[in-house]
Amino acid sequence: MEDEGRREDTTKWGELVVLAVKGTAAESVLDLAGAASLAGKTVIDTCNPIADQPPTKGVLHYFTTLEESLMERLQKRVPAARFVKAFSCVGHAYMVNPDLPGGPPTMFTCGNDAGAKDEVKRILAQFGWDIEDLGGVEAARAIEPLCILWCLPGFIANRWTHAYKVLRV
C-alpha cells in the first residue's frame, strides 16, 4: 500500500522517533511503522496506557497493570528499537523550557539502552529539564502511573500548570 510505504519511509528517515499517540493505539502505530524501520532507532515513548473509560473522581483508568507497563509491551513488540520513556507525566505547556518558581522540574526516564538514554538526556537538558534516570524498561511501571497523579489536580480543580521535582540532599 502507498500509505504503508510513506509511514516506513518516515521512520527510516528519522534519526530519532517520538511516539506520541493515544496509548491504546501505540502498538498498532508501531505495527504500521514497521519493526524493520525502527530497528536501531531511539524511540522516545511519551505514551501512557490510559483506558477508554472516563476517570473516576479524577482518577484515570489504565489498561495495563503494575506488573507490565505499556513501554514493556512496546519494547517486546519491537525489540530492535531503543525505547526511552520521557514526557509522559507532564502537560504540553511545560515540555520545553519548563520555567517554574521552584526551578526546573524532574523528567523521569527509563530504558534498556544506555546510548539511547544518553541521547534523550541531552535533548531533555537542552529543553531545560532536571533528569532522573530510573533504570531499565521495567521502571516504566512506576513512571507511567505518574500521569494519573499529574492529571488529578487538573480533573478535580482545573489546575494543569504543574510538574514534579525530585528534591535531592
Image: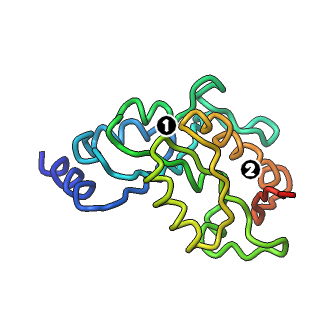
Query: Which image quadrant for residue 57?
Result: top right
Identify the residue position indicated by label 2 in the image: 151
Badge 2 crowding class, 10 Å Cα cut-off, few under 14, some 14 to 19, many 20 or more, is many
Q: Quadrant of the C terminus?
A: bottom right
- Horizontal side of 120 relative to 52 (left or right) equals left
Of the numbered discs 2 and 1, the one sitting upstream in the chain is 1
* Rendering coords of residue 110 (x, y %): 57, 45
- The residue sitting at 71% across, 45% down in the picture is 146
Q: Quadrant of the N terminus?
A: top left
Task: Tell me which amino acid carries mark 1.
Answer: Thr
| Closer to the camera in the image, 106 or 62 | 106
Task: Tell me which amino acid carries mark 2.
Answer: Cys
- The residue sitting at 45% across, 45% down in the picture is 113
- Is residue 55 depicted above or below 116 in this figure? above
Name the secondary structure under disc 1: helix
* Rendering coords of residue 144 (x, y %): 64, 41
- The residue sitting at 73% across, 76% down in the picture is 99
Name the secondary structure under disc 2: helix
Q: Which mark is residue 24?
A: 1
- Is residue 92 depicted above or below 156 in this figure? below
CA gap between label 2 and label 1 equals 18 Å
Asked if labels 1 and 2 touch by Cβ distance under 8 angstroms, the answer is no
- Horizontal side of 49 relative to 164 (left or right) equals left
